């Protein structure tokens, strides 16, 4: 009886151990895949179903060779163990898109026969996905760094303040790159503040005269009575108050270099005649002097005025116009160079931050306003605006709205106040008196209807902002919230 009792107790303990092992086997978070010495699957835990997308009954009793041939998973670490008789680790792909880290270990009996292959598998799909994303990010960072490098190269080629991204500016700078190597006179046309002065400086730096002086003369800033002496210089005692030693003029200082005449359209007609002589003969005579002096200069001129119209009106000499416009270049306004605005904004912000030793940043809403604005004063206005925002902001984040003076629309929209709201079934009344809507829901619905109506009638967030006495960023944000189609015209 005792032996029978001990045997029964031993069987119960063995059953208990088997049950515990079964539980451990089935509750393992990693897949366990067991085959016999021929590669036939004899046991798998439930995790295998999730990894392969197949039921346990579809796997047990089947040889791994067949499972591989059917594309359920590949490659097979078990087959490699059967071939090499040593542990193997592989990265496995399954038919349901999983990526698995599989380690297969051979089990030998006392005679050295391979009896089992036990494979432990970890699902690394998400890990590999993250790794691929990291790789993509690294590639993006590399691309970004290359772009930064390209921008630095562009800075070296186009000047520290010139950004060329729009087709028009790229074409202009490519042309000026060729022109800079010769001494032809360049006429820079365009609105005030478009960057004509910086372009003139760049042409000088790219020319063979870069070691000479670049002498800039603002023809509209020097009084006509002093212009001649400033331009040509004067001899000792030539007029009351003159230096006893005389003085070199700006033209003489530009010898071997470049003479840049800004706002040339402001020159009086009598001075235009004298300038024409300098251009034609590359010579001049000081005020009060009797000796003609030769100069070797390259001339660049700029104006925001319509010189051809001035010629027709007799306000500008035709022969001087033809002499100056050997290579006329019209620099487009900033509103036609939208491709460059964001980069220009950040470049100006960076320079102004360095100037004031600050680290201010722009809010997305303010950046949207800056990009959307037409900037009639062009780069000069943009730079002044950013500087004002930087110096008047106390914190790091600049989230102010542009002043009303920077609105693209004027009071010409006041007449729109006469627009009345007419819709079928009086939608406003339905919203207000609806018993199904809360107060917040009614207010939200009315706001959506108002914005929809004015966007339909005015066509742009800027016009709606002006009409509703709001900011463009606020209108844009609310339109996005209510899924209302917007434009920034």
Image (tube, grey):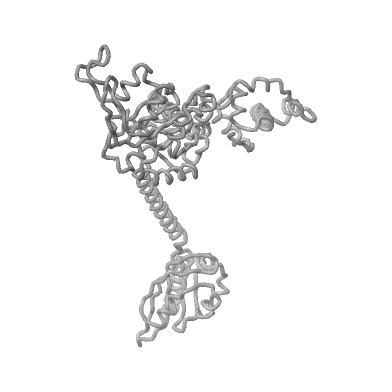
Image coords of residue 324 (percent x, y): 43, 34
Residue 355 falls left or right of residue 469: left
Query: Residue at 54% across / 74% down in the picture?
Result: 71
Query: Residue at 53% across / 68% down in the picture?
Result: 52
Residue 127 image-quadrant placement: bottom left
Q: Nearer the viewer, residue 94 or 237?
A: 237
Position of the N terminus by quadrant: bottom left
Image coords of residue 190 (percent x, y): 48, 32
Q: Nearer the viewer, residue 44 or 330?
A: 330
Looking at the image, the residue that sits furthest to the bottom is 111
Query: Residue at 41% across / 55% down in the picture?
Result: 139
Residue 7 image-quadrant placement: bottom left
Query: Residue at 35% across / 45% down in the picture?
Result: 181
Image coords of residue 116 (percent x, y): 42, 80
Image coords of residue 383 (percent x, y): 42, 29
Looking at the image, the residue that sits furthest to the right is 425
Residue 49 lies, with reference to residue 455, above or below; the image says below
Looking at the image, the residue that sits furthest to the left is 245
Residue 232 lies, with reference to residue 185, above or below; the image says above
Looking at the image, the residue that sits furthest to the front is 290
Q: How many marks on residues?
A: 0
Residue 23 falls left or right of residue 299: right
Residue 220 falls left or right of residue 231: right
Position of the C terminus by quadrant: top right
């Amino acid at each position: 009886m005792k032996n029978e009792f001990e045997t029964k107790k031993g069987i119960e303990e063995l059953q208990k151990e088997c049950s515990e092992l079964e539980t451990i086997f089935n509750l393992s978070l990693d897949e366990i895949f067991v085959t016999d010495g021929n590669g036939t699957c004899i046991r798998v835990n439930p995790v295998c179903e999730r990894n392969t997308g197949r039921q346990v009954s579809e796997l047990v009793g089947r040889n791994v060779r067949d499972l591989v041939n059917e594309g359920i998973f590949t490659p097979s670490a078990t087959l490699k163990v059967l071939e090499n008789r040593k542990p193997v680790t592989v990265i496995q792909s399954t038919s349901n898109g999983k990526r698995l880290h599989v380690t297969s270990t051979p089990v030998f009996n006392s005679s050295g026969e391979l009896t089992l292959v036990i494979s432990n598998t970890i699902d690394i799909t998400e890990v590999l996905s993250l790794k691929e994303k990291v790789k993509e990010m690294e590639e993006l960072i590399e691309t970004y760094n290359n772009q930064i490098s390209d921008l630095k190269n562009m800075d070296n080629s186009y000047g520290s303040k010139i950004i060329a991204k729009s087709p028009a500016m790229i074409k202009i700078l490519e042309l000026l790159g060729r022109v800079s190597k010769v001494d032809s006179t360049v006429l820079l046309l365009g609105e005030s503040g478009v960057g004509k002065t910086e372009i003139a400086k760049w042409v000088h730096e790219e020319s063979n005269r870069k070691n000479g002086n670049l002498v800039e003369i603002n023809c509209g800033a020097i009084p006509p009575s002093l212009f001649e002496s400033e331009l040509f210089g004067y001899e000792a005692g030539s007029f009351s108050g003159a230096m006893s030693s005389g003085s070199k003029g700006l033209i003489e200082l530009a010898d071997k270099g470049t003479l840049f005449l800004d706002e040339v359209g402001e020159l009086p007609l009598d001075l235009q005649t004298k300038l024409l002589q300098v251009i034609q003969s590359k010579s001049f005579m000081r005020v009060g002097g009797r000796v003609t002096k030769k100069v070797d200069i390259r001339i660049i001129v700029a104006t925001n005025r319509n010189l051809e119209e001035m010629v027709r009106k007799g306000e500008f000499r035709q022969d001087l116009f033809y002499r100056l416009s050997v290579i006329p270049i019209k620099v487009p306004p900033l509103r036609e160079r939208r491709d460059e605005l964001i980069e220009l904004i950040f470049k100006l912000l960076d320079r102004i931050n360095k100037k004031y030793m600050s680290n201010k940043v722009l809010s997305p809403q303010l950046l949207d306003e800056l990009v959307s604005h037409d900037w009639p004063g062009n780069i000069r206005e943009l730079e002044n605006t950013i500087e004002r925002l930087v110096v008047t902001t106390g914190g790091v984040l600049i989230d102010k709205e542009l002043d009303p003076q920077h609105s693209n629309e004027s009071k010409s929209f006041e007449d729109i106040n006469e627009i009345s709201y007419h819709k079928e079934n009086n939608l406003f009344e339905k919203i207000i008196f609806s018993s199904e809507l809360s107060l917040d829901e009614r207010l939200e619905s009315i706001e959506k209807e108002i914005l929809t109506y004015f966007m339909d009638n005015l066509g742009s967030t800027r016009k709606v902002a002006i009409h509703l006495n709001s900011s463009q960023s606020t209108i844009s944000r609310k339109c996005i919230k209510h899924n209302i189609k917007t434009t920034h015209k």
